[in-house]
Amino acid sequence: MLNEELKGRIEGLLSQSDVVLFMKGNPSFPQCGFSARAVAILRELGVDFNSVDVLEDPEIREGIKEFGQWPTIPQLYVRKELVGGSDIMMEMFESGELKGLFEKQ
């Protein structure tokens, strides 16, 4: 259950950067293939982003799924809006839509 304290923590993380990736591991050492792919896409686009390692915080790991109504990790947020997971990121990257999203910043 997403309580107010946890919701506030997540909103605080989202406020720290325009682009936040909730992932397993960190950009230097992703802990799953989907997180690695998400990092690779953002790096390919040259996007500055903050990452949150959900493996270090089980409360955030479960809370972010409820917060964005999205069942899987990684999750990409741009300007506090959920974009999606690595599959959606890949589709948007291939279509050019993801690049366009960052160019609006």
Image: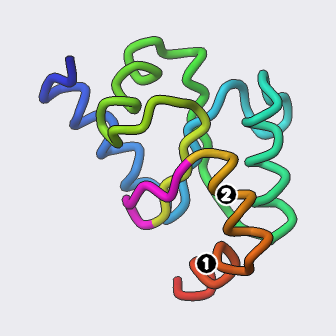
> Residue at coordinates 46% horizontally, 21% vertically from top-left?
61
Instruction: Indicate the secondary structure of the residue bearing disc 1.
Output: helix
Residue, x 53% and y 30% (percent of image)? 72
Question: In the drawing, what numbered circle is on residue 24?
Answer: none
Residue type highlighted by circle 2: Met
Above or below residue 99? Residue 17 is above
What secondary structure predominates along the stretch shown in magenta? strand
In-front residue for pair 96/2: 96
Q: Position of residue 17 (x, y in %)?
A: 49, 59
Q: CA distance from mark 2 to mark 1?
A: 12 Å
Instruction: Describe residue 41's horizontal placement relative to residue 77 as left or right.
Output: right
Q: Residue at x 83, y 60 (%)?
A: 43
Toward the viewer: 50 or 3? 3
- For residue 102, side relative to residue 27 (left or right): left
Residue 59 percent across, percent down from the top left: 38, 15
In this view, 25 is above or below 9: above
Residue 80 lies in magenta, yes or no? yes
Quarter of the image with the N terminus is top left
Classify mark 2: residues with Cα within 10 Å, few (<14), some (14-19) or many (20+): many
Q: Earlier in the sequence, mark 2 or mark 1?
A: 2
Residue that numbered label 1 is attached to: 102
Residue neighbourhood size for the residue with mark 1, other residues' Cα within 10 Å, grouped as few (<14), some (14–19), many (≥20): some
Q: How many marks?
A: 2
Q: Which residue is drawn at the image coordinates 74% and 77% (left, top)?
A: 95
In the structure shown, which secondary structural element does the residue marked by tag 2 occupy?
helix
- In the displayed structure, 33 sits above or below 93; it is above
Q: Quadrant of residue 49?
A: bottom right
Residue pointed to by mark 2: 89
- Amino acid, disc 1: Phe
Specify the segment rendered in magenta. Answer: 79-84
Image location (x, y in percent) of residue 77: 48, 55
Q: Which of label 2 and label 1 is nearer to you?
A: 2
